[in-house]
Amino acid sequence: MLVGHFMTKASDVVTCSEWDPVLNVIDAVLDHNISAVVVNDKTHKPVGIITKTDLVRAYKNGVNLHQKVGVIMATNLRTILDTCSRDDAAKFLEKNRLHHAIIVDKEGNFAGIVSVWDVASEMAKDSRAWPWNRTVDGRVAPMMAGVH
């Protein structure tokens, strides 16, 4: 299974501007029941990410909720190609101790986002498909004779 088949597509990712107030991001996280918001620049290129953990930390540190998100966003974005396998994405997230990664296409364009939850969900689908295999695009297919 390739990341590009189960990621949240860029067109469906909740985003904000680095000039938006922190309160708007809190509202977006709650309204959409998500755990991260991608921060885009004026050209819609990702320049940061804000997670629920970042928001809790900001609150604990007394950040003014009307302050711009650029102050609290993480800017060390880690990217994965949309052609990366699910297992390699899991290794990447574990190695880098990340809960989210930005997905890019071969030209480096923003393609989407993937979370550890997305990866775990795909692994669970493989488990439920047994004794059949799942194809690269996620469909269940019977195992071929002699192939295990």
Image (cartoon, rainbow, N blue to C red):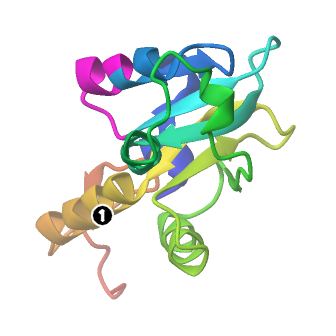
Res. 102 image quadrant: top right
State whether the magenta stretch is mostly helix, strand or loop.
helix
Residue at image point 60% right, 39% down: 72
Find residue 48 and report its horizontal and vertical position in percent.
68, 37
- Crowding around mark 1 (Cα neighbors within 10 Å: few <14, some 14 to 19, many 20+) is few
Looking at the image, can residue 42 be seen? Answer: yes
> On the picture, is 102 further left or further right than 7?
right
Residue at image point 62% right, 20% down: 68
Q: Which residue is mark 1?
A: 120
The disc labelled 1 sits on which kind of residue? Answer: Ala
* Residue closest to the eye, 90 or 77: 77
Find residue 29 and report its horizontal and vertical position in percent.
33, 27
- Residue at the right extreme of this rendering: 107
Query: Judging from the image, what secondary structure is the residue with disc 1 in?
Result: helix
* Residue closest to the eye, 93 or 133: 93
The number of discs equals 1
Query: Which stretch is magenta?
Result: 27-35
Residue at image point 35% right, 52% down: 118
Rendered view: 95 above or below 127: below
> On the picture, is 52 further left or further right than 9?
left
